[in-house]
Image (tube, rainbow, N blue to C red):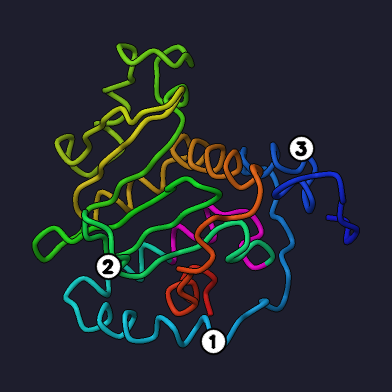
Amino acid sequence: MGTASRPSATGVRQFLDLEQQRAWIKGEIDLPDATDRSESLEQRFKYVARFAKLLSSPHAKDVLEILGLYGPNCIPIPRKTERFYWSVSCLPSSSDKPLIRVNASWMELFTLYAQGEDVRARFIVHLSDFTTDGSATPSLVDKPFLEQSAAEPDDVRYFFPRGADIFGINVHGSASIRQFLASRRVLHALRTFNLTHMNRGRNAYQASHCYSAADYMLSD
């Protein structure tokens, strides 16, 4: 990966050319990331209390372990792009009461919710990555694949958010979330969608970034 930026490019294109992005999506290369993080202490302290509240919950262990899987596997060069091209919010004050939400540009990528003593995940992806023919046709969702991607078939449910080629997947239970994230096809889809939105420009949710939660995504 070259050190020179591309002034005319937007998003992650400033750091990775299309060939590198495609190779990363396919799992063919490891991308060298920045050694240090560009961190705001004021921003870190802003969400310390919320992160402490999360740590005191019965869901903390599962949440942090899942973040540790999602971050390095689904976000390209996460240190170099942290906060400005993706962000993670801890206990964001939205009506659906999530534990964690990861965003890029104006788009939700990944959310974790409490589900009793366990957790539930919501992934937003391209519909065309989960149909039998690669089209964005709702009636052609590959249901057998989705059922096989979790520990139990009933642990995976899906919905259709507004927008062209947008697909939502709910995965119930930490065991099924881990199995879902271990699928090569799923990782390909998550990486593709995440890069799509990270390439759209600066992240709109920078102000809600929780560095303490990001530590677990970056293995700090």
Q: Is residue 143 magenta?
A: no
Which is more N-terminal, label 3 or label 2? 3
4 vs 125: above or below: below
Look at mark 3 in the image and give the residue it sits on: 18
Q: Nearer the viewer, residue 24 or 10?
A: 10
The local secondary structure at tag 1 comes to helix
In the image, is 137 to the left or to the right of 91?
A: right
The residue sitting at 44% across, 60% down in the picture is: 69
Q: Quadrant of the N terminus?
A: bottom right
Give x and y (percent) for residue 133: 45, 11
The residue sitting at 26% across, 42% down in the picture is: 170
Look at mark 1 in the image and give the residue it sits on: 42
Look at mark 2 in the image and give the residue it sits on: 62
Extent of the magenta region = 68-79
State how far apart marks 2 and 1 are (Cα): 27 Å
- Circle 1: residue type: Glu
State how far apart marks 1 and 3 are (Cα): 35 Å
Q: Mark number for residue 108?
A: none
